[in-house]
Amino acid sequence: MDSFVEETLKGLFEEAARGKIMVGGEEFNVAFNTKIVYPDQTTYETNGNDSFPTLYINNYPLFKSKLADCLLYQQYRTTNYFRSVQDKIKFLTAYTFANATFDDFANPLGFLDRTIAFIKDGTLTDTDEILDISETPIMADEVGVQSEPQSIYMETPNKMTFTLHGYDDEQEFIYRLPEISYGICEENGESVCYIYSSLNPEKLQIDNDELSHIYKRVQRSFYQVNKTVSEDPEQLNVSPSSVVSMSLFLGLLERAGIRKIKVVDYLPVRYNSRDIRAQELPKFTEELQERNDRIQANATNKFTSLFIRMTSHLPNLTMAGEIGDGIIRFELGESIENPDDLVNTLYTKSKKIENQMLM
């Protein structure tokens, strides 16, 4: 069995160095190099593109053991049917490392431990509550806050969703705010929350003119969060709805006693996947490459700017510096209430949220 796993992994490593892996006859754009150093100091290396991250493995037996443990958990995050065990191993391994930073590739054992911890953690997974926001400038009566599982295609096992509920005259409406992909683990005896993204959910199909008008008014009400920030373009270059979601999420973290936050703003395998796909287009040009780079830089900058923006509303949120490539560390202190700041108000309400079940 060990020789079968060995053959499967080496096959995956060779394919990843070429930028594509084959699973059940289907190609996936997964790109990374691999270097294994054995106890006798001999090495196994793949030689793909220099821009690919390199998976450094210094203890191959332990790596295989931890990977096996990780895949046992990861398999429940997909409903895919696999023609063979080999396909299953390759698919699950590829999508596990799609969520690795450059530093994770340099320390894969720690990364695998953290991935398992994310899946096993239950700190916020039972969140299913409603928060009264009727007295705020947000055009809604309440917001439903709910943790939901995510498939292996996403960065983390769980996401937090936020759904506004309200009435305009007699017209009921719901509005879905950006969803936050997160993972929680323990490091050095403390709970740490990793935040990977804040993304708009799929848009609802609206075939009602009245609802369409209401949604536009709801969106305009989000701009109330800009009242207490400076005219700094970096601060204003952040989606107001993302600010609303993040204020609610950070409040949940304080309530759970989580003070350490690590923001992950760059995952090389996911970026390279888009890059490889773009290069396969018949009309691929350097201009298109530059456009893709700008899109990635803009997404990274906006995500980082979101947290910088949050520090202007929450004096208890401070940036503690960068940790390697792709991760920025923040810390939450004791909250300082400011009723004149809408973001601060939402944060305060969230950390004190009544434990009501969402109907």
Image (cartoon, rainbow, N blue to C red):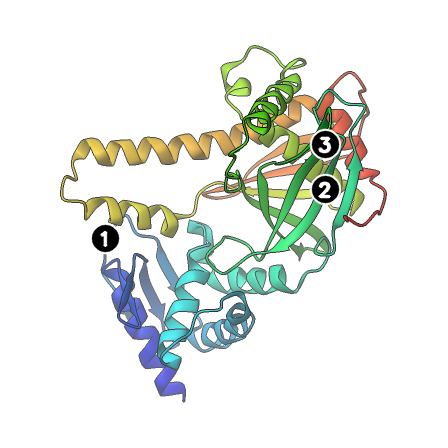
Which of the two labelled residues, at mark 3 and mark 1, occupies the earlier sequence position? 1
Above or below, comparing residue 166 to residue 38 in the picture: above
Q: Which mark is residue 49?
A: 1
Q: Residue 97: percent from the left, percent from the top?
A: 43, 59
Q: Is residue 294 left or right of residue 105?
A: left
Q: Residue 243: percent from the left, percent from the top?
A: 62, 29
> How busy is the neighbourhood of tag 1: few (under 14 within 10 Å), some, or many (20 plus)?
some
Name the amino acid, label 3: Gly
Q: Nearer the viewer, mark 2 or mark 3?
A: 3
The residue depicted at 33 percent of the width and 30 percent of the height is 294
Judge by depth and name the residue closer to the eye, 18 or 348.
Answer: 348
The outermost residue toward the bottom is 1
Q: Nearer the viewer, mark 3 or mark 1?
A: 3
Element at label 1: loop
Q: How many marks?
A: 3
Element at label 3: strand
Q: Which quadrant of the view contains residue 287?
A: top left
Q: CA distance from mark 2 to mark 3?
A: 11 Å
Name the amino acid, label 2: Gly
Q: CA distance from mark 1 to mark 2?
A: 46 Å
* Any part of residue 19 in sight: yes
Which of the two labelled residues, at mark 2 and mark 3, occupies the earlier sequence position? 2
Q: Residue 202: percent from the left, percent from the top?
A: 50, 42
Above or below, comparing residue 270 to residue 38 in the picture: above
Q: Which mark is residue 144?
A: 2
Judge by depth and name the residue closer to the eye, 77 or 92.
Answer: 77
* Any part of residue 334 in sight: no
Residue occupied by mark 3: 166
